[in-house]
Amino acid sequence: MNNRPDLESRLRAYLSSGARTQAPSGMEGRIAARVLGRRYSWAFQLLAAAAVLVLAIGLGVGVSKLRQSNAALKVSPRPTPIVTPTASVSPTATA
């Protein structure tokens, strides 16, 4: 069941027939127009730059808030012990 030579000869015949055909007229022009037509306007580029800037500022603010909250948790003051006077029992005077 060795179909490799048969497959190879069929592929070669198909490729040679495709190489002999001419490209449709105007095909190169249509391809070039599609490639060159995808240029972005300056307004789109400005909008994209503004979006990146807003994202960077928001990320910076978020990171600074996160650092502040972590710093507040780590530097919390230690509770000081409360000293309460103890009542001393004084001897009662006997008459």
Image (tube, rainbow, N blue to C red):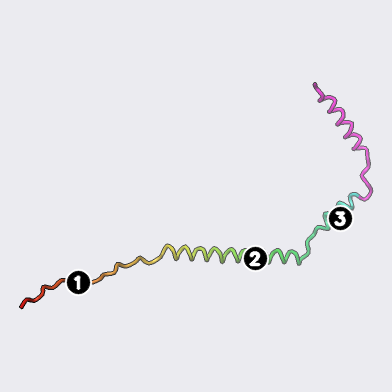
Q: Give coordinates of residue 47: x percent, y percent.
A: 72, 66
Name the residue located 6 percent from the left edge and 76 percent from the top edge.
94
Q: Residue furthest left?
A: 95
Mark 3 surroundings: few (<14), some (14-19) or many (≥20) residues within 10 A: few
Q: Earlier in the sequence, mark 3 or mark 1?
A: 3
Q: Position of residue 18 (x, y in %)?
A: 90, 37
**Looking at the picture, which amino acid does disc 3 mark?**
Ala
Q: Which residue position is annotated with label 2?
A: 53
Q: Which residue is mark 1?
A: 87
Q: Is residue 83 above or below residue 29?
A: below
Instruction: Judge depth for marks 1 and 2 and give the one in front.
Output: 1
Q: Residue 70: percent from the left, percent from the top?
A: 47, 62
Residue at the image position 40 percent from the left and 65 percent from the top: 76
Q: Which residues are magenta?
A: 1-26
Q: Residue at x 89, y 33 (%)?
A: 14
Instruction: Report the side of 93 relative to 84 (left or right).
Output: left
Q: Is residue 17 left or right of residue 82?
A: right
Q: Which residue is mark 3?
A: 33
Q: Secondary structure at mark 2?
A: helix
Mark 3 residue element: helix
Q: CA distance from mark 1 to mark 2?
A: 67 Å
